[in-house]
Amino acid sequence: MSSRAPTMQGIGPIWFHAHGSKMEIVAHDKNTISIRSNAASLLIRRSLVGVVDYLVEWNIDHDPGFTKGNVWMTGSELASAFGLSDNMGDFGEWLIARFGGTTAAEGKFIRYKKFLNVPCPGTGNDGDPNISIMINNNIREAICHILAARS
């Protein structure tokens, strides 16, 4: 299946939270990337042993609580999630058919152009158990850097 435009609302897809536009790189090296805003953070850590995998952890501060989670991604999935490729991940086709997007991997991410949600689409409102990130050049370059460190 190919890309399908999602229903748009505000700055992006209806499933994207507008605060995702505030996410910025705060630190990165060959093993980790830290992306955050005043209310959310995402940390990517590459596995230092075994297979080529990346642990993606997120934390969102809601009033009055928080949401956090994590998921493992392969290098190919990480590249797709952050717009370096449009390879479809496992069981991503049904997500694109239902919610619209460029690429997806069930339980890991959905992306439409520069609009990324990890691990799934949401309502676009506060309280969702996912994180939205608008991918910019700095984020894309950091992802390239962490992926290149593995080769």
Image (cartoon, rainbow, N blue to C red):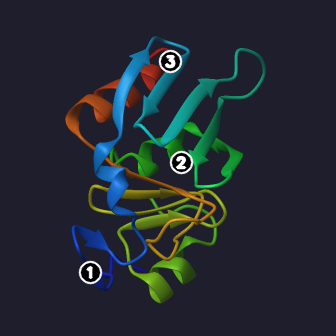
Q: Which mark is residue 97?
A: none
Q: Nearer the viewer, residue 146 or 125?
A: 125
* 2 or 1: tag closer to the N-terminus: 1
Where 141 falls versus 131 (above or below)? above
The residue under the point 49% across, 88% down is 98
* 2 or 3: tag closer to the N-terminus: 2
How far apart are the alpha carbons under marks 1 and 3? 38 Å
Quadrant of residue 140 within the rendered picture: top left
The residue under the point 66% across, 50% down is 66
> On the image, numbered disc 1 is attached to which residue?
8
Q: Nearer the viewer, mark 2 or mark 3?
A: 2
> On the image, numbered disc 3 is attached to which residue?
151
Please rate how many residues cluster around mark 3, counting C-alpha atoms within 10 Å: few if below 14, some from 14 to 19, many from 20: few
Residue 82 horizontal/vertical position (percent): 39, 45
> On the image, numbered disc 2 is attached to which residue?
77
How far apart are the alpha carbons under marks 2 and 3? 16 Å
Is label 1 in a helix, a strand or a loop? strand
Quadrant of residue 64 within the rendered picture: bottom right
